[in-house]
Amino acid sequence: MEYEAILFDLFGTLVDDAGRAIDGAAELLGCLQGQRYALVTSCSRALAVGLLRHAALPEFEVLVCADDVAANKPAPDGYLAAAKRFELQPERCLVVEDSPQGIHAGRAAGMDVVAILRGRERSFAVSATATFLTLARFAEALQIGADGVLRL
């Protein structure tokens, strides 16, 4: 599977409930420097930026928040808006999520979705394209080609 952009969820995927970076989040985002990646979240822009700073995660060039769309997850609006900002067809984007609503939103947008299980059973992620136990495991499987294409 090949993609030109990765679209991340915020809560549970990159930061935990206390606003700390999920294990492997900083390293994964560091490896993606120079690649196309976005944050798509149902929280406000101010909260998203504050959480990224608190977790010491890098800023995102493309950030789609509740303020930017008519409908939040499970609607596909946020993911479609991120693809549009990259001028990409939805199928060229990979979504990384940890909630049933987010998985549904990504699939409704016509995108492949990686579900991060974080100790939960796979049953919550039956519609995901792929599942990984942790964000770090996903990072290990992700390949970044010299051509800028992301492969899973």
Image (tube, rainbow, N blue to C red):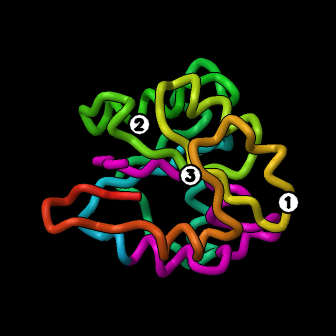
Describe residue 111's horizontal placement relative to residue 4 as left or right: right
Q: Which residue is drawn at 41% across and 36% down?
A: 82
Q: Disc 1 and disc 3: Cα gap in Å?
A: 16 Å
**How many neighbours does mark 3 have within 10 angstroms: few (below 14), some (14-19), or many (20 or more)?**
many
- Which is nearer the N-term, disc 1 or disc 3? 3
- Amino acid type, label 1: Arg
Region in magenta: 1-30
**Res 47 visible:** no
- Residue denoted by label 2: 82
- Residue denoted by label 1: 120
- The question of residue 9 being in magenta is answered with yes
In this rendering, the label closer to the viewer, 2 or 1: 1
Viewer-nearest residue: 70 or 125: 125
Quarter-of-image position of residue 102: top right
Q: Name the spot of residue 113 as percent of width and height, x first.
A: 55, 43
- Residue denoted by label 3: 96
